[in-house]
Image (spheres, rainbow, N blue to C red):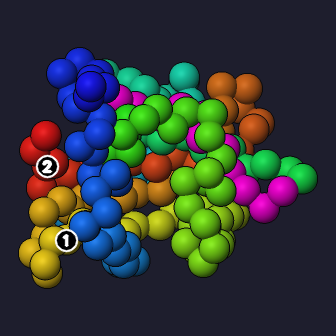
Amino acid sequence: METQALGFVLERSPRRQAYLDHSIEVVEKTSDPRALSLIGTWEELKARGGMVVSRHFPSRKFASLLPNILLLEKLERVRDFRIRVAGFGMLCFYGFDPSGRRLAELYDGEKHKARYDALSKVLRGRPSLALSRLCRNGETVLEREIVCLPVLASDARTPLVMVASFWSRRWLN
């Protein structure tokens, strides 16, 4: 029996398909207008103390992004991050709700180290942009731009990383 969430068959999610090759490359700029708007708002708020979750985000302007958001918190005693919040689009991508899970539960070895290092740089104030592709036999079947921004939790003190995905090719389930 297949598990479904709002009609989405979780066993068919992109991350569960072993025949797909996943690659991520760092890019210098984004082409998605929603990503540009998010980055622009973040830059504007940076000068005023930073973007605070629940105060500046989510907002009506960014409501459409919520399904494709991850909020991650760096763990102190281990080299890892925990996903505090994951939108429904990320549940569909991973095939399960990643909320509450550590990166080490999703990635191992060099992939975990690369993600940990990249997210740590983001927390130190260096936003990152990347292009993620899932390919089958050299043909791209799913593509998204990923924007990672340092933000603050609702207490305006706890640093978090917001990861927003902007899909240009959607997964057909």
**Is 88 contained in the magenta span?**
yes
- Circle 2 sits in a helix, a strand or a loop, which is it? loop
Task: From the viewer's perspective, tell me whether residue 48 is left or right of residue 124.
Answer: left
- Circle 1 sits in a helix, a strand or a loop, which is it? strand
Q: Residue at x 65, y 47 (%)?
A: 102
Task: From the viewer's perspective, tell me whether residue 1 is left or right of residue 128.
Answer: left
The answer to which of marks 2 and 1 sits earlier in the sequence is 1
Task: From the viewer's perspective, tell me whether residue 85 is left or right of residue 95.
Answer: right
**Is 37 contained in the magenta span?**
no
Q: Residue at x 77, y 36 (%)?
A: 157
Q: Residue at x 15, y 48 (%)?
A: 171
- Which stretch did the figure color magenta? 78-89
Q: Are marks 2 and 1 in contact (CB under 8 Å)?
A: no
Q: CA distance from mark 2 to mark 1?
A: 13 Å
The quadrant in which residue 21 appears is bottom left
Q: Which mark is residue 108?
A: none
| Residue 8 picture location, percent across and down | 21, 29
Residue type pointed to by label 2? Arg
| Residue 168 picture location, percent across and down | 14, 56
Q: Residue at x 66, y 25 (%)?
A: 154
Q: Which mark is residue 135?
A: 1
| Residue 78 vs residue 2, the one in the foreground | 2
> Would you say residue 151 is visible in this rendering?
no
Residue at numbered disc 2: 170
